[in-house]
Each structure stands twice: as C-alpha cells, then as structure tokens.
Image (cartoon, grey):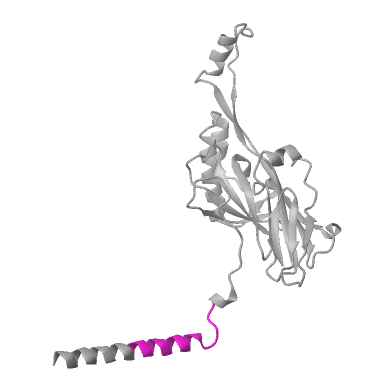
Amino acid sequence: MVGWVDIWRGILLCDVLQESPKLHDMPLPLPAKSNSHRAFLNTTDQYCGDVAVSRDKSFIKYVEMEIVTPKIVSATPPGDCDPDPFLEWLRRRECKDLKRTLVHGRWKATTWRMPIPVTSWDDWCRDCAAESAELSTDNPKAYELLCAVSKESLKEDDDDKAMEAATTTTTRLPLGRLGMAYPAMSIDDDVIYVLTKPVMGNGKAAFLTAVDVRRKKVLAVAKLDSAVFMRCYLAVGISKHFFSAPGTRESLGQAEDHGQKSARRRRRRRGKRQE
C-alpha cells in the first residue's frame, strides 16, 4: 500500500500489488473551527498537521494543531488629541520610543486514528488532545531549556514586570512565549515533535520539543542545527536489518581473519621479490 498525503485535502491510497491497482481517496477529519479555509491557504500544509502510520501498520495517525502565535505589539504614544495631519500620525507610528509588549500565544493538539485496512471516512476516531497551558514536565533539563528560549522572546518586551516574571522560579512552562508549530507524529505512541523558536527569532537556533499528548507532558527538548522555522524532520522507523542478527558477528570475524591472512600473504610475496 502506497499513500500520498495532502493535509488540506486528504490521503490518496493505492495497493500497488493488486493486479489492477486503483486509487482510493480518504479525506482527513474535518478541520477545527480556528483552522478556517483561509488559514489553510495562507500556510503550508505541514504548519499545523501531520500524518504517520503506526510501526505495526495497524492504523493511520493524524495530528492537527490549532495555533495562535505569540506576537510583539507596539503602542502608539498618547497625545493631547488625535493628530489631524496624516504625516503627524505617521511620525508617531515611526517613533523609536514605542513601548513593545509580548502578547502570549497558545495552541491545542488533537490526534486521530484510522484502522487499517482503510474502509470509510466514518472510521476516523478522535484519540486524545492537549492544550499548551495544560502541559507540565518531569524533565528539569527540558524545563530549563524552554525557560532560556522564552527569555529570548522577552528581550523584545519592554515591560519590566514580564522580564521579572520570567526570571522568577515557577513550575509553569513558558510555552505561551514561544513560537511552536510544524508537528511530526510519532509512529509508536501519542508523542508529537513540535518545532520551537523564540518570538522574532530569525537567525536563532531552533529547538524540537517532544510532547506526550495523552499524558499532557513535555518529555524532552533538543537543539537543532537549523535556524530556519520550517519543517526539517520526520518520524521514521529504523529497519530491523540494521541490527546485528545471530551469526553476524561471527561472519564479520571470519571476514576479518580472511583479510589478515591475505595481508600476510601479500607481505610474504613482497619479501620474496626483494630477495
């Protein structure tokens, strides 16, 4: 079975081993209300969704994220009255002393399952969901790293209270201050891998955050080599043929002995020629 995925439309399936292969169209679950048709057209399909097949090939997995991105907003300085000329209004807008404030974002991830073999769109089953504000972590390193990344976002915030709150010890994860998108669905469990960057983080390193949607926990955070906020990873399974099978080490030992014997024969031949 081969499948082609378009998050905006669905999955196109084809059993290439049949005598007369036919294409089978399977739509994905209806998008959430916040993921309107306009939002889908303005972003790549990987920005808020992903499809994977379980390792045992028993079902298809789908994750959808509803994302409200954090942003930096600037407030126009108050005046005695509203400026009449347009140029005066424009001058105030371009003022470098504008106060900037970080508006926190949020997101919600929902996972679905479809049993294999695929039969009907009605077989899509909602599995589990988690919101960013609900998440916790038992990993101190992950917590420290997320806090460090979130402080990069607060450098754009002129509110001293926000900076003070960021440095205060707390058990709440600062996910609202981070840009998080491009989920990748795990093939084994209910974990999704989400690309994470500070707000206005162009040129800064990106991170990958592992989230257990069912348990509502952040499992780990890892730094990526790429500084671009785009999908550069996918969930895959490592073939069992990469692992050592019974007899493999013995075969490698035999090959090594054969190589050593060949080297000794070559040295003896060179010695005879020199004599």
Q: Magenta-highlighted stretch: main secondary structure?
A: helix
Q: Is residue 219 visible?
A: yes
9 left or right of 248?
A: right
**Vertical placement of 207 versus 56: above or below?**
above
Task: Write down the quadrant of residue 18 in the picture.
Answer: bottom right
The front one of 80 and 188 is: 188
**Vertical placement of 202 versus 100: above or below?**
below
Q: Which residues are magenta?
A: 243-260
Q: Is residue 249 magenta?
A: yes
Q: Is residue 174 visible?
A: no
The front one of 181 and 221 is: 181
Q: Give residue 184's position: percent from left, percent from top.
A: 64, 55
Task: Write down the quadrant of residue 11 in the picture.
Answer: bottom right
The front one of 53 and 102 is: 53
What residue sits 13% from the left and 93% below the top? Answer: 275
Task: Write down the quadrant of residue 121 in the picture.
Answer: bottom right
Q: Give residue 4's position: percent from left, percent from top.
A: 69, 58
Q: Give residue 267's position: percent from left, percent from top.
A: 24, 89
As drawn, which residue projects farthest toward the front? 20
What residue sits 53% from the left and 28% below the top? Answer: 158
